[in-house]
Image (cartoon, rainbow, N blue to C red):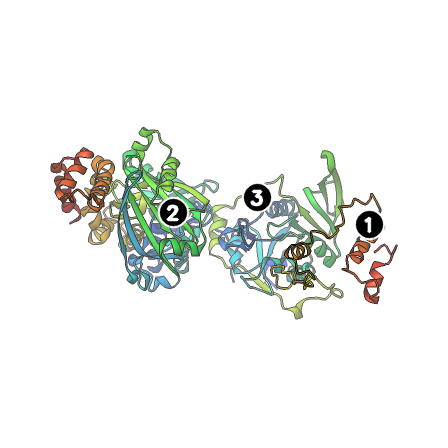
């Protein structure tokens, strides 16, 4: 294999990017999120991840692969990234459906996504470092770096504000020094061995600008695409069932059938129908109590008001006193 | 497959093209399209992150110019609404008089005019150029001209590490305030009287509300041009429909606006509150506010269109037609840009990219509507922006209509001449002046 993408000697630093519309419109009435490919770009966190990848690879004389999962609409952004002298790779998602709901995307299986990304990187060799933004502007479960670290068997250091090569390491080894915010303005400094997956905040660094030559070359270049079929995906272990979200709809509680008032007097009927003469539980403050007692109080409330049937064997286990569930 | 990495990138000094087109608006993309189709190497240098990202637009795109350039363009153009109703409204503070025209023919192919979002339209047109082989360089500013020892323009300097793009011809399509045209000495450094300031608000309204209020359906749209809404400052107003927004704004003479010390947003606020406009906009919410200069000076203020190694097209060449009932710019930009691209192709083929080698550009435009219309209507801006047309005639015409339509029983109906005399006297217009302006208008527009 003579492709320089795959034969370069030196550490491999991967910038794992999430390219999305940075200015989506949200319908104030329905909450529907409308995204436009023209707004695609790198979030501040992803831009920081890319810049730190370039700096670290520069110090190590390594190479940078910038990878993003997405449809062809993200290619212009990847070309801008390629203009920086970075090898880019777009991983084609399994589902390319522009009409996919936001909630459906939110429920995507991040573990599966991590496996797809790791599989896509196989031709480039094992990555020494993967740098991600610590959050994305549209989904933001924040779980992907951890899943990537799990897939690679790498250490993870997440939510960093600084990431630099550790120049105290001798003997040809490599490691990183990372900084993370703590409360009250404190910072903690971490020694990060390799291989590692790090996520960084969008702070402290500014993404460099591409040269004219790089921009010109990238403007006309195709973006390599790696489509991963499920059959190619290595199964490191049994997949954990992921959360699935079905179609959403407006909550419409069922109508409850109430017995007709017995009286023929309109006033009494009105009082009965409106419940004006029915005693109601006043607001009650319970506590402070522990979680177990609080749960018992809630269960007792539900039983008292008929939402749970204590004689139902399936429900009895959830309402038992002192179960602590 | 070529890989987009720096390893393959040419050094800045090796970047040389047949043409560098500065600006990826309608003129620039059309020029690049013509050049790419002719097999010339061309790069578009666009300041924004994508074509149209910074463009402001307050009118209708008339697509007839696209027929010969992009066959069946309407099938994939990013249209908001096809304009089927065109209204010209004259107003005073409390009155309005409209000439309203509607036709279903404009709502079917090949259509007449459309409202569109410039960021989408410009991106669409630029994509046609890149599909044909042009290169698009975004987020890059052309900071200055490169010249050879003879002073001939041979490229542009960019803000990417001051790197240079060399070319046989530079086509400056960098808009109304073209710094390249100024640097080349083709445009004066500043001449405020040649410009108006357009300001607009984009207001959100549900699509069905727009349909109901403007009396349209589906992709049908409305364009309303307004006279008399600028507190006497030479200019006008507009209101047009997009899919689920409406754009409302004013255009005002730059020096008069400065002299009046009126903020342009005050003029928009006036227009939005006018009893003839407010019902259209009730319940809307502000989505965008934008302002932009417009070169409305017309034919007499047009700069030379070419110099050695450089040409101007679109707004940088003052090719906006502001002639009262006709307010057009994008179609003139596209036509001039395409003609510029064709002229560069001819010049490169002949090996003569001097001003004389590029002279076929102007000759070509003089055969087309671009300069024919501008030349024929060269006196229109002076008439349309004159004191009487701007400040007196809207009120005169409204009073004339009011006098004719007001029932004054038991008094007998006044004659038309009497109503006209009264209205003219009220607004300080002599019938002699009215007749002279009518004759002048007939000469210009007839």
Determine the residue positioned at 45% across, 53% down: B206
| Residue that label 2 marks | B279
Q: Position of residue B120 (x, y in %)?
A: 42, 54
Q: Are marks 3 and 1 in contact (CB under 8 Å)?
A: no
Instruction: Give the Cα distance between marks 2 and 1.
Output: 56 Å
Q: Chain of mark 1?
A: A
Q: Secondary structure at mark 1?
A: helix
Task: Tell me which chain the residue with mark 3 is part of.
Answer: A
Distance Cα–Cα, label 3 vs label 1:
51 Å
The answer to whether residue B360 is visible is no
Q: Which label sits on residue A294?
A: 1
Horizontally, residue B110 falls left or right of residue A229, namely left
Task: Decide: is A260 above or below A203.
Answer: below
Q: Which residue sits furthest right?
A: A322
Which badge, 3 or 1, comes first in the chain's sequence? 3
Residue designated by label 3: A207
- Which residue sits at x=20%, y=40%? B383
Left or right of B105: which side holds A16?
right
Neighbours of disc 3 within 10 Å: few (<14), some (14-19), many (20+): some
Taking A139 as reference, is B235 left or right?
left
């Amino acid at each position: 294999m003579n492709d320089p993408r795959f034969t370069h000697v030196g550490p491999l630093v991967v910038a794992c990017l999430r390219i999305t519309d940075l200015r989506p419109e949200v319908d104030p009435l329905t909450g529907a999120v409308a995204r436009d490919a023209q707004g695609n770009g790198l979030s501040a966190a992803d831009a920081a991840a890319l810049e730190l990848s370039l700096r670290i690879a520069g110090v190590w004389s390594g190479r940078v692969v910038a990878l993003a999962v997405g449809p062809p609409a993200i290619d212009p952004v990847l070309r801008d990234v390629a203009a920086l002298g970075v090898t880019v790779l777009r991983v084609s998602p399994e589902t390319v459906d522009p009409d996919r709901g936001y909630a459906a995307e939110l429920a995507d299986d991040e573990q599966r996504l991590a496996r797809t990304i790791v599989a896509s990187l196989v031709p480039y060799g094992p990555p020494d470092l993967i740098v991600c933004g610590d959050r994305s502007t549209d989904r933001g479960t924040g779980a992907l770096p951890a899943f990537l670290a799990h897939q690679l068997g790498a250490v993870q250091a997440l939510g960093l504000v600084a990431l630099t090569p550790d120049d105290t390491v001798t003997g040809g080894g490599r490691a990183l020094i990372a900084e993370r915010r703590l409360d009250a303005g404190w910072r903690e400094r971490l020694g990060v061995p390799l291989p590692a997956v790090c996520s960084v905040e969008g702070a402290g660094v500014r993404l460099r600008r591409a040269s004219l030559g790089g921009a010109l070359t990238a403007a006309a270049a195709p973006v390599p695409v790696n489509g991963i079929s499920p059959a190619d995906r290595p199964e490191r272990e049994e997949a954990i069932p992921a959360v699935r979200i079905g179609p959403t709809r407006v909550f419409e509680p069922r109508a409850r059938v109430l017995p007709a008032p017995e009286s023929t007097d309109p006033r009494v009927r009105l009082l009965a129908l409106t419940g004006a003469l029915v005693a109601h539980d006043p607001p009650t403050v319970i506590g402070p109590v522990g979680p177990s007692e609080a749960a018992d109080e809630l269960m007792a409330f539900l039983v008292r008001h008929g939402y749970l049937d204590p004689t139902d064997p399936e429900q009895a286990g959830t309402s038992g006193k002192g179960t602590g569930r | 497959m070529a890989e987009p990495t720096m390893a393959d990138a040419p050094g800045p000094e090796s970047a040389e093209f047949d043409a560098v087109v500065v600006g990826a608006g309608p003129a620039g993309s059309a020029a690049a399209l013509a050049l790419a189709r002719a097999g010339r190497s061309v790069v578009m240098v666009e300041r924004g992150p994508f074509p149209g990202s910074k463009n402001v637009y307050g009118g209708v795109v008339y697509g007839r110019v696209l027929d010969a350039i992009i066959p069946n363009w309407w099938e994939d153009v990013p249209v908001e609404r096809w304009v089927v109703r065109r209204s010209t409204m004259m107003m005073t503070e409390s009155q309005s008089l409209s000439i309203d025209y509607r036709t279903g023919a404009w709502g079917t192919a090949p259509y007449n005019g459309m409202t569109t979002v410039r960021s989408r339209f410009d991106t669409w047109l630029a994509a046609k150029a890149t599909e044909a082989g042009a290169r698009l360089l975004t987020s890059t500013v052309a900071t200055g001209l490169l010249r050879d020892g003879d002073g001939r323009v041979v490229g542009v300097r960019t803000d990417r590490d001051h790197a240079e793009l060399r070319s046989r011809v530079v086509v400056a399509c960098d808009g109304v305030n073209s710094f390249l045209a100024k640097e080349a000495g083709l445009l004066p450094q500043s001449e405020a009287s040649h410009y108006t300031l357009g300001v607009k608000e984009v207001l959100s309204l549900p699509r069905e509300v727009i349909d109901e209020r403007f009396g349209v359906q589906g992709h049908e749209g409305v364009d309303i041009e307004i006279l008399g809404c600028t507190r006497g400052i030479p200019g006008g107003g507009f209101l047009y429909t997009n899919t689920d927004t409406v754009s409302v704004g004013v255009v005002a003479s730059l020096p008069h606006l400065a002299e009046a010390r009126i903020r342009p947003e005050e003029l928009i606020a006036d227009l939005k509150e006018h009893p003839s406009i407010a019902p259209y906009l009730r319940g809307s919410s502000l989505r965008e506010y934008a302002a932009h200069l417009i070169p409305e000076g017309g034919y007499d203020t047009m700069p030379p269109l070419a110099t050695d190694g450089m040409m101007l097209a679109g707004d940088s060449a003052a090719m906006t037609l502001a002639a009262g009932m006709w307010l057009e710019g994008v179609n003139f930009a596209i036509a001039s840009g395409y003609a510029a691209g064709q002229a560069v192709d001819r010049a490169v083929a002949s090996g003569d990219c001097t001003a004389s080698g590029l002279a076929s550009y102007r000759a070509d435009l003089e055969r087309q509507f671009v300069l024919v219309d501008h030349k024929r209507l060269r006196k229109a801006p002076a008439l349309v922006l004159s004191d009487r047309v701007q400040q007196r005639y809207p009120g005169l015409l409204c009073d004339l209509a009011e006098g004719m339509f007001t029932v004054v029983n038991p008094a007998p109906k006044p004659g038309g001449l009497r109503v006209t005399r009264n209205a003219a006297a009220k607004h300080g217009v002599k019938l002699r002046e009215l007749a002279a302006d009518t004759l002048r208008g007939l000469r210009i527009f007839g």
